[in-house]
Amino acid sequence: MDNARSFPVEKRSSTEDQILFLVVEAQGELYAVRWALVLEAGVLLRQELDLSSPTPQVQRKGTTFPLVYLWELVQLPPPQEDLTELPAVFLEDGERRMVLVPDRILWKQEAGIKELPEWIAKAPTVRGSIVLGSGVVVVVLEPFGWESESKRVA
């Protein structure tokens, strides 16, 4: 009696839909943001921050960008050290803008986005994941999902 069954193998294109991401780090954990959202990535000096409003802001080329720390976005405890130079990623999605401040800006990565289990994907900041060549899974963030969620709560 032959109990072996044949199951169809999911065919994947070798040219799977590849998207560019910017990989950043917060407290040793890797995260990715869609490259299409990135206007600029570099260093932000503390004196460039406007701390007079309830939400810290940065002015760049006549445009105001609210400041969001990556550790805050992914609900990690704040770092111990207070740096004078901050890594900064200026993001824009239509009319929405922000400066995302990770611990480090690492590299640009091309990868196909993978879906996550529903219970994880419900988090407003999570869009999916990518898998690096080393096998490390990196969570893809949707930073503007967090922004709209925080506005609903307020």
Image (cartoon, rainbow, N blue to C red):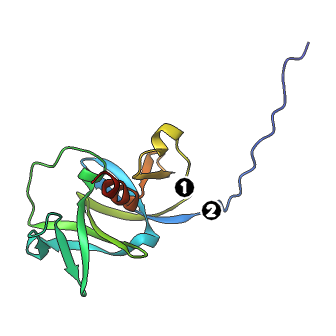
Quick check: 133 left or right of 70?
A: right
The picture places residue 134, in percent across and down from the top left corner, at 46, 48
Disc 1 residue type? Answer: Ile
Question: Mark 2 highlights which residue?
Answer: 17
- Furthest residue in direction right, as rendered: 1
Question: Mark 1 highlights which residue?
Answer: 113
The picture places residue 119, in percent across and down from the top left corner, at 48, 37
Identify the residue at image location x=8%, y=74%.
Answer: 47
- Furthest residue in direction bottom, as rendered: 61
Disc 2 residue type? Answer: Asp
Quick check: 43 left or right of 41?
A: left
Q: Quadrant of residue 152?
A: bottom left
Q: Earlier in the sequence, mark 1 or mark 2?
A: 2
- Furthest residue in direction top, as rendered: 1
Quadrant of image for the N terminus:
top right
Quadrant of image for the C terminus:
bottom left
Q: Residues within 10 Å of mark 1 (few under 14, many from 20)?
A: many
Q: Residues within 10 Å of mark 2 (few under 14, many from 20)?
A: few
The picture places residue 151, in percent across and down from the top left corner, at 31, 58
The picture places residue 6, in percent across and down from the top left corner, at 84, 31
Quick check: 138 left or right of 87?
A: right
Query: Is residue 122 shown above or below 87?
Result: above
Which mark is on residue 44? none
- Can you see residue 131? no
Disc 2 element: loop
Answer whether labels 1 and 2 touch (C-beta < 8 Å).
yes
Identify the residue at image location x=31%, y=48%.
Answer: 74
Cα distance between the residues tagged 1 and 2: 8 Å
Front residue of 13/63: it is 63
